[in-house]
Image: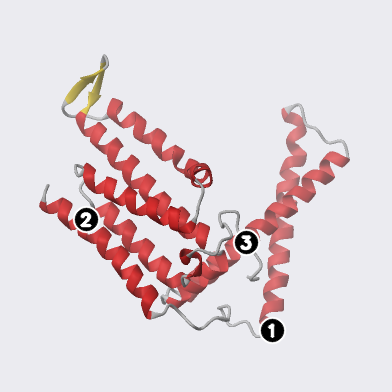
Amino acid sequence: MAGGHVHALYRHGTSPLHRMQPEVKLAATLLFVVAVVAAPREAFWAFGAYAAIVIGLMITARLPAGFVGRRLLIEIPFLLFAVFLPFVGGGERTDVAFLSLSVEGLWAAWNILAKATLGASASIVLAATTQVPEILTGLSRLRAPKAIVAIMGFMVRYLDVVIGELNRMRIALRSRGYAPRRLGEAGALAATAGTLFIRSYERGERVYLAMMARGYAGSMPDLDERGGHAVQWAAASGFAAAAATITATAWVLR
């Protein structure tokens, strides 16, 4: 993957989080999410503490609230699922504004809402401060399976390629006056999908053969071999330790 490939989730900046090595941010984010998921759902104060940590990271990374809010829309399907849980859940019920709601369903909805929002927010901070090639480099340094890292790299890279090919084919159809208004006219769309698949497959095979001819051995070279230094690892450890301490305290005070 070319170093100039920048994903839409990334936001250019020079904050300390932007300068931190990717493997450090990946490890800290993973440990934070694990701590959040492990927290008891009854500990409201713990989720407030997690939210304060995430907001502090957003301020450090200089991420506008609108930027984060728009990207949090990805969790809407999960939130819609959570909304129905109090209505369809079983067990003890309680009346809220003339509605009979399941107590267990309310707890489950809160659990999904809090943990999904915190996990998504932490992931947004990671993606906004780390370019895709850097994330793949970080995974490699954390000894993730090479095949998985390679698949992820090609998936991200060729998703944009396929979308670009699809847009060119769509423009070609429109330039020829194709504007289906009846179901019987949708046959061209099926042919377009088949052509898109064949073109993508052939292009991917050509690129792979070209890479093999240039010595590709299953993984991209690491052009920056510095890795995270002690200060960065210490900061990440403190971040993860704070989240773990909150979770442990929440279970003790439960």
Residue 138: x and y, percent?
Answer: 47, 72
Local SS, label 3: loop
Marks 1 and 2 sit apart, C-alpha to C-alpha, by 50 Å
Residue pointed to by mark 2: 246
Percent across and percent down for residue 8 are 60, 54
Kind of residue sitting beneath label 2: Ile
Q: Amino acid at mark 3?
A: Val
Spatial separation of the CA atoms under disc 2 and disc 3 = 35 Å
User: What amino acid type should be assigned to the residue bearing mark 1?
Assistant: Arg
Q: Is residue 77 above or below residue 207?
A: above
Mark 1 neighbour density, 10 Å: few (under 14) some (14–19) many (20 or more): few
Viewer-nearest residue: 166 or 127: 127
Reading the image, the residue beneath label 3 is 6
Q: Which residue is mark 1?
A: 214
Q: Residue drawn 54% across and 67% down?
A: 151
The residue most toward the bottom is 215
